Image: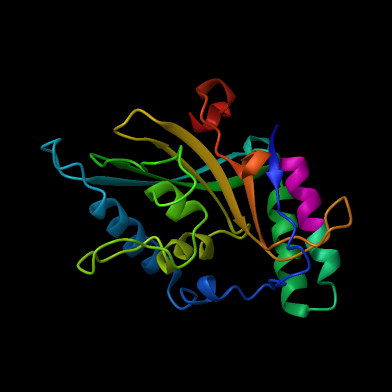
Amino acid sequence: MIAWKFPSNNYGEVMGVDNPGIQTFRGDPLLSLAREVNQNSLDAADHESGRPVEVHFTLDEMDADFFPGRDKFMEVLHSCHEYWKDNKKAKHFFDQAISVLGAPRVKVLKISDFSTTGLRGSDRIKGSDWANLIKAVGASDKEGGAGGSFGIGKHASFVCTPLRTVFYSTLDIDGNLALQGVSKLVAHEDSDGEITQGTGYYGKTHRNEPITSKDEIPESFR
């Protein structure tokens, strides 16, 4: 099944709206976004291609229905709003998020890089570029000389979206195709009455895996 899923926190840590990683880049979000994205692309340069790395930033506006799993995600936003209704900062954030996704059209920032290796290892659950970016926390394995990291730096993208949601896709040099959405919200109560973790995923709900079949990837993301 392909859908949004926020795993249960199993009565553990409860994540609020002030995500430490995201707060790190609050001071200058656009500069942070450009710096971290470009550094990650440069670190993944395909030196065999003989071409320089290119990173393209495109701001577009699309029908809100393009957002994968929009109805389910709206339910999540309302659940977050209800769970944190006594927190003024959280209430303000989710009032805005609900308004953004409830509008007929939404702004979409697309970032594409070329002459890179892509995000390799989407078929592995640990120790790969893909796994470190999508799910790992504090697990960057880059050498000390690399300017960027898939550790704290990946949070820069989430500062620039009022939905705190990023969709990652890759066609890497090994021929692996993958798409997965990541949303860094807050702990909330799901439809089964379980309290969730703050981070949720759009993809295969079994083990929160990425979508790897082109036919299953929404057309807007192919």
Where is residue 69? Give x, y as percent. 70, 39
At a point 26% along the width and 49% down the height, the residue shown is 44
For this rendering, which residue is in front, 42 or 194? 194
Tell me which secondary structure the magenta stretch mostly adopts. helix
The quarter of the image holding the N terminus is top right
* Count of numbered labels shown in the rendering: 0
For this rendering, which residue is in front, 207 or 111? 207
Picture quarter containing residue 145? bottom left
At a point 77% along the width and 79% down the height, the residue shown is 88
Query: Can see residue 191?
Result: yes
At a point 84% along the width and 67% down the height, the residue shown is 83
At a point 47% along the width and 35% down the height, the residue shown is 178
Query: Can see residue 104?
Result: no
Q: Is residue 48 left or right of residue 193?
A: left
Please, which residue is most extreme toward the top here? 215
Where is residue 31? Give x, y as percent. 36, 68
Give the magenta part as a residue range.
Answer: 70-78
Where is residue 42? Give x, y as percent. 24, 53
Q: Is residue 152 left or right of residue 195?
A: left
Please, which residue is most extreme toward the left here? 50
Magenta run includes residue 71: yes
For this rendering, which residue is in front, 49 or 114? 49
Where is residue 120? Give x, y as percent. 36, 41
Residue 161, placed above or below residue 144: above
